[in-house]
Every structure is written in structure tokens, then in C-alpha cells.
Image (cartoon, grey):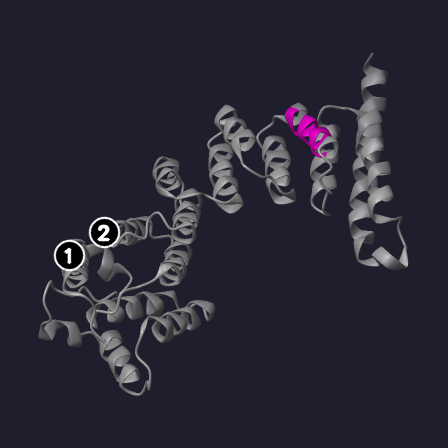
Amino acid sequence: MKIATGRHYLIRDFYALLHNHSTEIKRIHIPAPEPQPCKSDCESNAFSNALQLLDEMSRRDVVSLTALIGNFARQNQHKEAITWFSTMLHLNIRPNEYTFGTVTRSCVLLKDLHLGQQFHAFAKKIGLNSNVFVGSAMLDLYVKLSNVGDAEKAFKDTYEPNVVSYTTLIRGYIRERRLEEAIRIFWSMPERNVVSWNNMISGCSQIGYNEEAVNFFVEMLREGVMPSDCTFPCAMIAAANIGALGMGMSFHACAVKFFGGVGDKRHGERDEIYRVLNFIIELVMDRQDTSLAEF
């Protein structure tokens, strides 16, 4: 299956890009195609096996190859997934946003930032960097591999970023302890869901901004957002860290109101959550007693 001539040259450019970084590529055994087809492509066992399997496929297009790449990725065979991406380019089949989403995830799990940057550069060349699915995948890669600078660029390139895009960038800022920027992005979101709120509450608590975490939880309730199982432990840990016994007990009562009590047949799977919450209440009370004794 051939693609348009203009796109053909873009793919050849990516061949060259891969070839220029052959040291990184060999490290994870990815074949490094030359700008034009040559015999060295088939000298790689992985590449040859890919072509053999391809010969047995009745359908050779972006859908079938993306599905195959995804299958390798789901089996944690990420090097093979990358090899198949290279095979796709060798056949002049243009990847789509789902292809990039899959191979970008493989780069994350391989902890290969440089290869991920190469995929991002190629996505820009073929005009997919503004796609929200590709942009969110790149954001996730850069945040998880601790490159917030490139994450910011990926976010700016994304056309109409969604909740996932915003939340991922916020997570990156929090990891870098750039709380003011995280808060600015949070309040600029067109819409916020429970995951977004949990991200701010847990993130603030984890980096020591417990009062801010408690305030976000209170604001979440004011906006009428339904907390999840993850929300209350994070909020109560933040309350425990600032010794706010009354507030912690209020949060506990709120959890019971939302989800029912321990042993409630409707919410039996949440019994463990309540045990955690009860433990946190005890922890706060112990701290309160210690403070009074010292006083």
C-alpha cells in the first residue's frame, strides 16, 4: 500500500532521523532504516520476522498494522511494537493518531525519552502533533520521563486539549513542585472532573502543601463534584498532616454520607477505605493529644 509522494518524502526523512540516532536505536534493537531501501534493513532478524509475518497478512493497511502493534504492546513486547512501527514506515504506510499513541506508550515503558522525542518530531512532520490524542500521549511521555519543558511544548501544540491533557500537565508541574503554575492551569481548564480534583488534592498533599490540599477538597464539594474512593483518604491525610481533627472528622462523616457505613451491603467493597479513614482519624487524635500534652 503506497501513500502520496509528498508523504513518502516525510517518511524517508524519518528514516534518516532514525539512522542519525542509530546508537540509541540499537540499544533497544530497533532496525534503523536508511533514507532509501537497502539490504541492511533485512539483516535484522526482528525486521525479517516482521516482514515474514506481514506476508501472511491478508490486509496491509494502517488499521491492521496498528492493531498488530497494539497487540505486541499489550503483551509487553514493546521492542517488537517499535520494530513493527519501523516496518510500517518501510512499507510507506502512514501512521495515524492511534499508532502514535501505542508506540509512545511503549517508549514510556522502555524509559526511552530520546526515541519518544523522535516519534514526536515525526508526528510534527506529518501534521499529527496537534491531534489531541497524540498530544496527550506525548504529554504523558514527557511527564513520566521528567521532561516538563517538552510537555509544555506538546500541550501548546495540541488543538483543543481535553481534560486528560490538562490533568497530565498539572501532574508534571506538581512533580516539579511548581504549584503556582499547576494551580493556574487547573483554574484555566474548560471543565474539571473528579480525576482533576483528585490530582490537585493528592499532589498538594504529597509535596507538603496540605492546607492547599484541604482547600481544594472543600472547593470541590462546593462545586458539587462527587468525590471518589480516592478523594477522601487524600483529603484526610492532608487534614492529619496539619492536625485538623475537627475537619478530618467532618471529612469522615462526609464519606459515610456519600458511600454508606462499614458493612453496608451496598458498599461492602469500600470497607477497606473506611478502615483507612478510621485509622487516619485515630492518627489525627493521637497528634492532637500529643500537642495538648506538650502544651
Q: Between residues 245 and 184, which one lies in front from this camera angle? A: 184
Residue 125 has which mark?
A: 2
The correct choice, above or below, for 218 with respect to 272 in the image is: above
User: Is residue 135 something one can see in this rendering?
Assistant: yes
Q: Left of 262 or right of it: where is 87?
A: left
Return the x and y of residue 68 as percentages of the image width and height.
38, 74
Q: Residue at x 45, y 43 (%)?
A: 161
Q: Nearer the viewer, mark 2 or mark 1?
A: 2
| Mark closer to the chain start, 2 or 1 | 1
Q: Amino acid at mark 1?
A: Asp
| Prevalent SS, magenta region | helix
Between residue 160 and residue 149, name the one nearer to us: 160
Magenta part of the protein: which range? 212-220
Disc sitting over residue 179 in the figure: none
Q: Is 254 left, or right, of 112 in this rendering?
A: right
- The local secondary structure at tag 2 comes to helix
Label 1 SS:
helix
* Residue 255 as seen in the image, left or right of residue 170: right
Q: Which mark is residue 13?
A: 1
Q: Is residue 218 magenta?
A: yes
Which is nearer the eye, 295 or 110? Answer: 110
